[in-house]
Image (cartoon, rainbow, N blue to C red):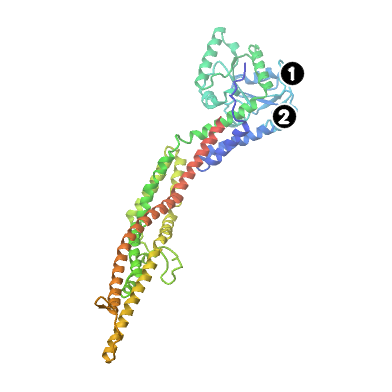
């Protein structure tokens, strides 16, 4: 009979590395026992690979009275194991070695103290290490624990069943069904067929085949043998010799272990993966909530008003604009912009924006929770909790980060347009003209008061030039101030819209950094975990 072969895929080394990677990524996200089991499988596989790969460890496992010790003696060609009928006689596993040179470290790892070199019988068993295990249904706990330990370690499992108990639920539910993924390294022997009528043997074998198929063990070889009469032993020896000669049982066993551990990890992580687009779509509601809580509407209004305020100070009529200086700048009242004492020095610390109300805080918390829920999707409970925690992991820092973003982004709102300087200089120029006209008129008034001769007085039409300079300067200054106010009103609205857009963008970046990025990082971890599981299961 030929060994069922896996299709070509990644090497065992790469699959072991993928299993370890998956276990590391699942740390703290999946149940600790599942993760530790995967680590233990990888560690065990690494140890087995470092030991003799020229030897195949096959174990005879069975229930009390199944005749496995008798079968062990027959295969070994010597009375190595004590034989009992109704009570367990094998207390510790013992080994029969064919060409056992170099197998010492492997047997030490297996913790097999009793080792025998049997007489050469039948086909070439060179490289075979045959173990006789204690009874898996022994009344002694130590025996059952020893069986469980070695079942996890050996390369080839030979289950010895008997006609009376081959359908026993204990062996099927505890061992055969859980080891369905190990069918490539499993053989089932129906022993003691000499106790059955010839027609009953076929019926038992067909029924056993049905049970094994139900256990997920389709294709596992089934042999009917009799240790007493020798029936079927030739086929069993030939099968063991073939498995030993192929030198693949150890790698097939490790491959099955890796697949089982990867399947166990995968079972704990639900699918399908969360929709990254759905998570990204929650950035807008989060930005809306953060903007409202950060007082962005208040800042935008202050930018609009502050722009007009500074425009009046910069471009107003010098005669009256000094009154505007007594009014506070709306942005500086919010501690946004520069200090009043040093225009180049930025204000340090939080702004003076009002603290978010309870409703606004609740809206932010709801938006963060929605991000976590959408990102968690159908993930397993612990992993979903990790995603939700990632969404909230930096929530404590969020308020200060948003406040800093508002303050720094709003710095552009205090930049003065160049035309303010030009208009300011023009205002002083017309103010100087007005003053010159006033002084000229003052000189003329004084000369007239002193009865001094009047110098020739130039006129513009019928209006004297001093009067033109005084009145025209005043009128021009007021007109320029009014036009500047109109331009400042339009500019304030434009700047407010630009600042609103920039603030929203800055707050969106804060939301992405403090909420969305941790979530995306956790989802990326889950994606890497899934990819590692896929490689480990290949």
Q: Can residue 295 be seen in this view?
A: no
Question: Which residue is drawn at the image coordinates 74% and 26% (left, top)?
Answer: 100
Q: Say left or right for 17 vs 421.
A: right
In the rendered view, tell whether residue 443 sits above or below residue 207: below
Q: Say left or right for 307 vs 249.
A: left
Work out which quarter of the rendered image holds the C terminus and state it: top right
Residue 232 on image: x %, y %: 63, 12
Mark 1 or mark 2: whose residue is earlier in sequence? 2
At label 1, counting other C-alpha atoms closer than 10 Å, the crowd grade (few under 14, some 14-19, many 20 or more) is some
Closer to us: 528 or 199:
528
Say the numbered circle drawn on residue 103.
2
Alpha carbon of mark 1 to alpha carbon of mark 2: how far?
A: 17 Å
Residue 2 on image: x %, y %: 62, 17
Which quadrant of the structure image shows residue 4? Answer: top right
Closer to us: 334 or 481:
481
Secondary structure at numbered mark 1: loop
- Count up the numbered dots: 2
Question: Which residue is drawn at the image coordinates 58% and 30% (left, top)?
Answer: 257
Instruction: Report the mark closest to the observer, 1 or 2.
Output: 2
Residue 426 on image: x %, y %: 36, 70
Question: Which residue is drawn at the image coordinates 33% and 68% (left, top)?
Answer: 312
Residue 340 on image: x %, y %: 41, 70
At label 2, counting other C-alpha atoms closer than 10 Å, the crowd grade (few under 14, some 14-19, many 20 or more) is many
Q: Is residue 273 visible?
A: yes
In this figure, which residue is indicated by the disc labeled 1?
120
Closer to us: 335 or 325:
325
């Amino acid at each position: 009979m030929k060994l069922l072969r896996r299709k070509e895929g990644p090497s065992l080394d790469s699959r072991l590395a993928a299993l370890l990677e998956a276990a590391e990524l699942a740390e703290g996200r999946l149940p600790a026992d599942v993760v530790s089991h995967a680590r233990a499988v990888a560690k065990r596989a690494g140890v087995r690979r470092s030991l003799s790969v020229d030897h195949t460890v096959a174990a005879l496992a069975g229930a009390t009275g199944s005749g496995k010790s008798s079968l062990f003696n027959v295969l070994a060609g010597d009375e190595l194991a004590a034989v009992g009928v109704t009570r367990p006689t094998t207390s510790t596993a013992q080994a029969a070695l064919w060409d056992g040179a170099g197998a010492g470290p492997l047997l030490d790892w297996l913790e097999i103290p009793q080792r025998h070199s049997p007489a050469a019988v039948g086909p070439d068993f060179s490289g075979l290490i045959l173990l006789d295990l204690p009874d898996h249904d022994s009344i002694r706990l130590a025996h059952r624990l020893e069986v469980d330990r070695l079942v996890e370690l050996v390369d080839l499992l030979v289950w010895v069943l008997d006609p009376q108990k081959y359908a026993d639920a204990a062996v099927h539910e505890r061992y055969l069904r859980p080891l369905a993924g190990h069918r490539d390294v499993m053989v089932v022997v129906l022993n003691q067929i000499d106790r059955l009528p010839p027609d009953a043997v076929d019926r038992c074998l067909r029924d056993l085949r049905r049970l094994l198929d139900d256990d997920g063990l389709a294709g596992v070889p089934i042999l009917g043998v009799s240790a007493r009469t020798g029936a079927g032993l030739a086929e069993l020896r030939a099968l063991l010799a073939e498995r030993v000669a192929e030198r693949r049982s150890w790698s097939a066993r490790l491959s099955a272990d890796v697949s089982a551990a990867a399947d166990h990890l995968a079972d704990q992580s639900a699918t399908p993966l969360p929709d990254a687009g759905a998570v990204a779509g929650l950035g807008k509601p989060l930005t809306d909530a953060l903007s409202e809580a950060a007082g962005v509407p208040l800042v935008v209004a202050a930018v609009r008003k502050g722009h007009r305020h500074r425009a009046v100070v910069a471009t107003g009529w010098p005669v009256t604009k000094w009154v505007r200086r007594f009014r506070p700048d709306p942005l500086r009242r919010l501690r946004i912009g520069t200090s009043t004492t040093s225009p180049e020095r930025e204000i340090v610390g939080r702004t003076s924006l009002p603290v978010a109300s309870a409703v606004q805080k609740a809206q932010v918390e709801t938006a963060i929770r929605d991000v976590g829920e959408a990102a968690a999707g159908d993930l397993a409970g612990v992993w979903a909790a990790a995603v939700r925690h990632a969404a909230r992991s930096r929530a404590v820092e969020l308020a200060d980060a948003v406040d800093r973003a508002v303050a720094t982004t709003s710095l552009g709102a205090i930049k003065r347009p160049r035309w303010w300087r030009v208009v300011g200089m023009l205002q002083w120029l017309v103010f100087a003209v007005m003053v010159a006209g006033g002084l000229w008129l003052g000189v003329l008034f004084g000369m007239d008061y002193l009865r001094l001769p009047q110098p020739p007085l130039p006129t513009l039409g019928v209006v004297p030039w001093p009067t033109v300079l005084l009145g025209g300067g005043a009128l021009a200054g007021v007109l320029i101030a009014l036009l500047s106010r109109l331009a400042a009103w339009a500019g304030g609205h434009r700047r407010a819209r630009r600042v609103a857009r920039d603030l929203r963008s800055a707050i969106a970046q804060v939301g992405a950094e403090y909420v969305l990025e941790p979530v995306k990082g956790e989802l990326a971890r889950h994606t890497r975990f899934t990819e590692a599981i896929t490689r480990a299961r290949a």
